[in-house]
Image: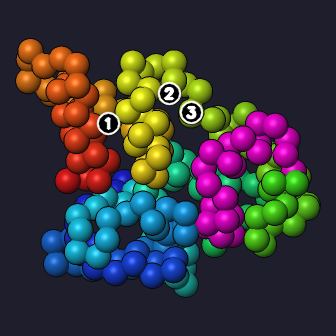
Amino acid sequence: MFNSLSGTITEKLEDTLRINTGGVEWDIVVPATDMGRFPPRGGEGRVFTWLYHREDQMRLFGFFDDTRRNTFLELLKVEGIGPKGAIKIMGGIGQEDLERALETDDIGRLEAVPGLGKKTAQKMLLTLKGKIVRHSESVSINTPYNDLVEALAGMGYDKRAAAEALSDAEDNLPPGLAGTEKENLLFKQAILRLTGV
């Protein structure tokens, strides 16, 4: 129903992001690890969303990018993990740490996530192994701009999203650019795309 919302960030709380789009202010539950990646209050941002709807309640959940939303949806497939639990898990472990833990069967790392017990961690390994794949490896293979991807990742952006933003930016560069000038403009344009400006 909703893919994403773009607008002005009006408030950032511990697990709630408020964003104004066309005069409507939305109240969105967001993982703590995503919250810091959104622009500060007053900035323009884009939130990827998922609507939870039951007879007695509706709740909008939000994520910094599509990768994070997909992770959330995969977590919901694990027996015993609901939307609130998935948000809490994602708030206690970063994307790459989660991907690595699932790939390497690192149950100890999963158990270290606040609120995640041994049984649920085991269910996560059984259900999600191979489903949430580390993006850092594919990014290094698929883009000629690994240094720029790493720089954007260092700023908190997802590596796959950074690679896609760089690719989109390259398609729209003026002709004749090369070397440092090209890389600088690519970097700036990628940041604009990642922040939804």
Q: Could you tell me if the residues under marks 2 and 3 are in contact, i.e. CB atoms within 8 Å?
A: yes
Residue furthest out toward the front: 180
Question: First in sequence: mark 1 or mark 3?
Answer: 3
Q: Which residue is nearer to you in this view: 194 or 124? A: 194
Query: Residue 168, can we see it?
Result: no
Query: Residue 40, can we see it?
Result: yes
Q: The magenta stretch spans which residues? A: 85-107
Please, what is the dominant secondary structure of the magenta stretch? helix
Q: Position of residue 29 (x, y in %)?
A: 49, 73
The residue carrying mark 1 is 165
Numbered tag placed on residue 139 in the rendering: 2
Q: Could you tell me if the residues under marks 1 and 3 are in contact, i.e. CB atoms within 8 Å?
A: no
- Give the quarter of the image for residue 180: top left
State how far apart marks 2 and 1 are (Cα): 12 Å
Question: First in sequence: mark 2 or mark 1?
Answer: 2
Circle 3 residues within 10 Å: few <14, some 14–19, many ≥20: some
Circle 2 residues within 10 Å: few <14, some 14–19, many ≥20: many
The residue carrying mark 3 is 136
- Give the quarter of the image for residue 10: bottom left
Which residue occupies 28% across, 46% down?
191
Q: Which amino acid does label 2 sit on?
A: Val
Classify mark 1: helix, strand or loop.
Answer: helix
State how far apart marks 2 and 3 are (Cα): 5 Å
Would residue 87 appear left or right of 46 to someone viewing this image? right
Which residue occupies 39% across, 18% down?
144
Q: What residue type is labelled 3?
A: Ser
Classify mark 3: helix, strand or loop.
Answer: helix
Residue 109's place in the image compared with 186, above or below, is below
- Give the quarter of the image for residue 128: top right
